[in-house]
Amino acid sequence: MTLYAIYAKPEAGPEAIAVLSERFRWTAFLFTPLWAMFHGAIGFVLVWALLVAALAASVPLIGPAAALGLYGVFALWTGFAAARIAGRALLRRNWLALGELVAADGATAERLWLEQRFGARP
C-alpha cells in the first residue's frame, strides 16, 4: 500500500484531479532537470541549475569525486522528494491539496477519494 496525495482544480471541472504517490521516483533521480520541467517545477529547475553551477565551480577546491558525490546526494534526495516537488508545482498553479490516503494504486486512490468526497456510487 502506498500513500497518495490528492490535488484538484475545481474550476477546471471534475476530471481535474491529480493523484501523486509518495514513493521514490527513478525518473526524478536519473533525469532531474527533465523530470522537473515535465512536472512544471520551474523553480526547482533553477535551484538545480544553481547547484550544478556551484558544484562545477567548486571542483578545483573539493575535487571531481566529491562534487559528483554531492550531486548524487542531491539527485537521491530529489528522487525521494519528487511527489512533494510536483505537489508544490501544482499548488503554484492554483491547484488545491485535498488530502492524503492509502491505496494499492493511483486509480484506486482516486476512486476512494471520489467516494469519500461525493459518496459511494450505486
Image (tube, grey):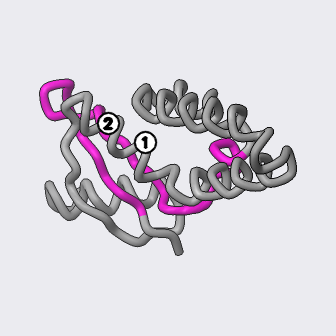
User: Helix, strand, or loop for circle 2?
Assistant: helix
Is residue 122 something that shows in the picture? no
* Picture quadrant where residue 98 is located: bottom left
Asked if labels 1 and 2 touch by Cβ distance under 8 angstroms, the answer is: yes
Residue at x 50%, y 69% (from the top left corner)? 2
Which residue is under mark 1?
Answer: 86
Quarter of the figure with residue 17: top left
The x, y position of residue 5, in whole percent, is 35, 57
Residue at 61% of width from left, 60% of height from top? 24
Kind of residue sitting beneath label 2: Leu
Magenta span includes 71: no
| Quarter of the image that includes the C terminus | bottom left
Number of callouts? 2
Residue numbers of the magenta segment: 4-29
Residue located beneath label 2 in the image: 90
The answer to which of 56 and 95 lies nearer the viewer is 56
Disc 2 to disc 1, how far (Cα)? 6 Å
